[in-house]
């Protein structure tokens, strides 16, 4: 469990992203997706794999329905050693656009160390790299940390998933949590040639012998205290600056009676604010890496990992409902998709899709359209052009022919980014032959919000199909069906 120290400026936090241009991602070396690094926690256990629950009972809770977290995972009280769960995590991380995880590590032979081979194997299959979060296990010293770095480099360095930074001498990466517990880190000089070791601080007087700085603290990221000074110092001294951003923070169920402030997600505005702080020159700007707190630290409610939209009742769980205009099941993956957007901003020029858009440029028809706004505008790759149906004549439909049977699990719909917010009610039908259709997503309202680039995700029942049909029955912004882009993805 984390104890967050820096809560400077909470009373002045305004979680509205300023309407200013996103700054360039770096000065000199261009950032890549691997430079977005998600803190990853392989410390959970369940009876089916581990023999008993581990971590989920924190705060005197009784899994599986009652866990020590304010959100409930879509996967339930899973086991970090379950290869199916790890594979699902890596698939979701692919979707986020981030290229690296920073796995929590508690010493040689620890529970988390024993799971590393499974994590590396899955990460390698999914094109994800693995860096290391060195935790403050009992009696940790600077010397033992050097031994740990040598052990990790030697034991796991041959894995294709092992992270090395080509822009900084092909060295591996280690984040040292609570590095200020130790005052003399001169032993790190022994590994500086092979490894980049980051101190958790913005105090530039505490980073002698380190290769860089990071913050971890998701609450402090909202006001970025000391970030500008830390960033300038790292740039001037050839060090790595890796500020940490988070979607929110709440640990009330994991630590009953605690007095730690919470950081409300505000439907995604908090996450956007922290990303803006990380990239804005006024608060540091041009980071080397951006670290994200976290993919799955459930105890602190800082997760990007999908949380159930309908969690077990009677426990008071929160959900991601409303995040970036998403509702219901679509909201579960809202923070993954928003991370992908910010990865694109950081790296400049966007991120190639983890899997291709199967609908792009395919034959597309509609039940009707207003002259000048044809159905072909809905999959031409231009979010500025759009299809619009005959007005005041619901229902209306838009049908795309994928050309052959293809596995599809989600659609992504967008409207022009300059438009005001609106909610469209729609369902999705699928067909193998273009004649007989079945529902793969029931009728629901999807809120298109300019704060989320007027883009929504529509999960559909996974399966192979050739034709996909959107059926519109309402629109709060205009009395017609409207789509600028419809995209179809396997995962």
Image (cartoon, grey):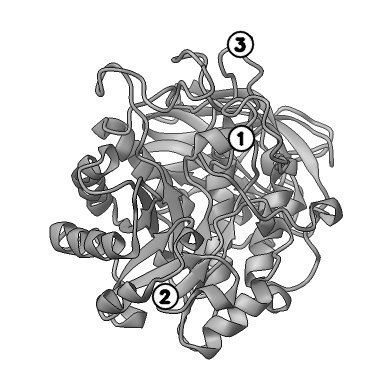
Question: Mark 1 touching mark 3, by CB under 8 A?
Answer: no
Q: Is residue 381 visible?
A: no
State the residue position of label 3.
313
> Measured from the top left, where is residue 359 in percent x and y?
47, 49
SS for tag 1?
A: helix
Dot 2 or dot 3: first in sequence order is 2
Residue 382 in the figure: left or right of residue 238: right
Depth check, mark 1 against mark 2: the one in front is: 2
Q: Position of residue 422 (x, y in %)?
A: 80, 41
Residue with the mark numbered 2: 210
Q: Is residue 414 above or below residue 8?
A: above
- Label 2 and label 3: CA atoms lie apart by 47 Å
Mark closest to the chain's N terminus, 1 or 3: 3
Furthest-top residue in view? 314
The residue at 39%/51% (across/down) is: 135
Q: Nearer the viewer, residue 40 or 230?
A: 230
Front residue of this view, candidates 346 and 412: 346
Q: Position of residue 389 (x, y in %)?
A: 73, 41
The numbered mark, 1 or 2, whose residue comes first in the sequence reads 2
Q: Nearer the viewer, mark 1 or mark 3?
A: 3
Q: Would you say 474 lies left or right of 359 here?
A: right
In three-dimensional space, the C-alpha distance between marks 1 and 2, rounded to whole angstroms, equals 40 Å
Q: Residue 331: which numbered mark, if any?
A: 1
Q: Position of residue 175 (x, y in %)?
A: 41, 61
């Amino acid at each position: 469990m984390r104890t967050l120290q820096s809560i400077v400026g909470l009373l002045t936090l305004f979680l509205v992203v300023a309407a200013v241009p996103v700054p360039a991602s770096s000065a000199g070396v261009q950032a890549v997706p691997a430079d977005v690094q998600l803190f990853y926690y392989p410390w959970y256990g369940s009876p089916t794999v581990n023999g008993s629950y581990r971590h989920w009972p924190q705060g005197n809770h009784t899994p599986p329905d009652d866990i020590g977290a304010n959100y409930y995972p879509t996967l339930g009280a899973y086991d970090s050693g379950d290869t199916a769960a790890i594979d699902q995590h890596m698939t979701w991380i692919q979707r986020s656009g981030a290229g690296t995880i920073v796995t929590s590590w508690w010493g040689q032979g620890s529970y988390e160390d024993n799971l590393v081979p499974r994590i590396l194997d899955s990460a390698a299959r999914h094109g994800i790299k693995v860096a290391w979060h060195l935790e403050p296990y009992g009696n940790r010293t600077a010397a033992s940390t050097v031994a740990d770095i040598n052990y990790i480099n030697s034991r796991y360095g041959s894995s294709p998933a092992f992270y090395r930074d080509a822009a900084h001498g092909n060295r591996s990466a280690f984040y040292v949590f609570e590095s200020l517990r130790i005052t003399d880190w001169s032993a790190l000089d022994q590994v500086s040639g092979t490894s980049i070791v980051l101190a958790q601080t913005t105090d530039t007087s505490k980073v002698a012998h380190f290769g860089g700085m990071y913050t971890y603290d998701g609450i402090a990221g909202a006001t970025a205290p000391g970030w500008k000074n830390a960033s300038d110092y790292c740039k001037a001294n050839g060090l790595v600056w890796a500020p940490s951003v988070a979607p929110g923070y709440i640990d009330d169920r994991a630590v009953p009676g605690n007095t730690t402030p919470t950081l409300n997600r505000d439907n995604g505005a908090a996450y956007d604010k922290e990303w803006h702080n990380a990239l804005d020159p006024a608060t540091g700007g041009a980071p080397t890496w951006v670290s994200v707190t976290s993919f799955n630290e459930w105890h602190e409610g800082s997760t990007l990992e999908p949380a159930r939209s309908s969690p077990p009742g009677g426990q008071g769980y929160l959900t991601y409902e409303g995040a970036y205009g998403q509702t219901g099941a679509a909201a579960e993956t809202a923070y993954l998709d928003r991370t992908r957007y910010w990865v694109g901003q950081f790296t400049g020029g966007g991120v190639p899709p983890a899997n291709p858009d199967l609908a792009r440029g395919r034959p597309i028809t509609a039940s009707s359209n207003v002259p000048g706004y044809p159905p072909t505008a809905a999959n031409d790759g231009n979010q500025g052009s759009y299809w619009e149906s005959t007005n005041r004549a619901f229902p209306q439909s838009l049908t795309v022919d994928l050309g052959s049977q293809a596995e599809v699990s989600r659609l992504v719909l967008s409207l022009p980014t300059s438009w005001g917010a609106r909610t469209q009610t729609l369902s999705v039908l699928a067909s193998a032959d273009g004649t007989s259709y079945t529902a793969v997503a029931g009728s629901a309202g999807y809120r298109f919000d300019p704060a989320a680039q007027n883009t929504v995700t529509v999960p559909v029942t996974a399966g192979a199909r050739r034709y996909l049909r959107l059926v519109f029955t309402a629109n709060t912004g205009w009395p017609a069906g409207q789509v600028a882009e419809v995209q179809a993805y396997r995962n």
